[in-house]
Image (tube, rainbow, N blue to C red):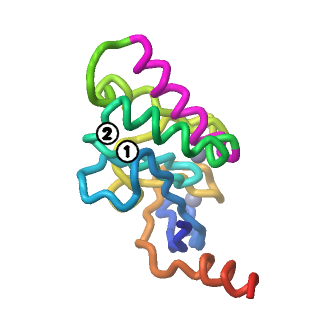
């Protein structure tokens, strides 16, 4: 679900609004704890269920093929998880060996653990990764998409 947020850059005083997306690896309705990672450049987040075991992951992967092929971000990082699962033993997803390898292909940027609520993001004006988001204030883009279809 895309959310609109406002951000400002202390270096060049640029202020802007943009959308942030969260991709899910696992079930988005789950109450179980997740680890969040994000790209500071395009502010795409990914939430990974920490109790997701490998056979559930395979099943989930099988049911989400079309959304994976639509997202370079997701297909890259899920391909990485699948490759690590194939080469290491274990029951749960190997998140500890995984987290430092997650990557945003469109931005050519490694993912950071956390979210834009706690880490600086990249300013589209000056390019410095020192800007602060001021939180999501609306999911208006979703409402607009719904309106367009009716
Ligand atoms: Zn990115
Ligand atoms: Zn700036």
Q: How crowded is mark 2: few (under 14 residues within 10 Å), some or many (20 or more)?
A: many
Rounded to the nearest whole Å, what is the CA distance between mark 2 and mark 1? 8 Å
Q: Is residue 112 above or below residue 142?
A: above
Q: Residues within 10 Å of mark 1 (few under 14, many from 20)?
A: many
User: Does 113 sit left or right of 63 as displayed?
Assistant: left
Disc 2 is placed on an element classified as loop
Q: Residue 48 carries which label?
A: 1
The residue to which callout 2 is attached is 52
Q: Residue at x 53, y 55 (%)?
A: 43
119 vs 31, nearest the viewer: 31
Give yes or no for residue 42 being in the magenta stretch: no
Q: Quadrant of the C terminus?
A: bottom right
Q: Which of marks 2 and 1 is in front?
A: 2
Q: Is there CB contact under 8 Å for labels 2 and 1?
A: yes
Q: Residue at x 54, y 73 (%)?
A: 4
Q: Residue 95 carries which label?
A: none
Quadrant position of residue 37: top left
Q: Position of residue 58 (x, y in %)?
A: 46, 32
Q: Where is residue 117 in the image (x, y as percent from the top left)?
A: 36, 62
> Which segment is the magenta one?
70-87
39 vs 91, nearest the viewer: 91
User: Does 36 sit left or right of 50 as displayed?
Assistant: right
Quadrant position of residue 99: top left
């Amino acid at each position: 679900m895309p959310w609109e947020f406002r951000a400002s850059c202390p270096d060049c005083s640029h202020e802007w609004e943009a959308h942030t997306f969260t991709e899910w690896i696992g079930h988005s309705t789950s109450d179980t704890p997740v680890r969040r990672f994000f790209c500071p450049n395009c502010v795409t987040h990914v939430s990974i269920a920490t109790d997701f075991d490998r056979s559930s992951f395979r099943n989930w992967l099988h049911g989400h093929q079309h959304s994976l092929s639509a997202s370079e971000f997701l297909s890259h990082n899920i391909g990485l998880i699948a490759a690590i699962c194939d080469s290491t033993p274990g029951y749960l997803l190997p998140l500890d060996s995984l987290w430092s390898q997650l990557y945003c292909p469109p931005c050519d940027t490694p993912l950071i653990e956390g979210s834009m609520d706690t880490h600086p993001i990249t300013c589209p004006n000056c390019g410095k990764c020192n800007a602060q988001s001021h939180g999501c204030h609306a999911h208006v883009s979703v409402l607009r998409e719904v309106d367009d279809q009716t």
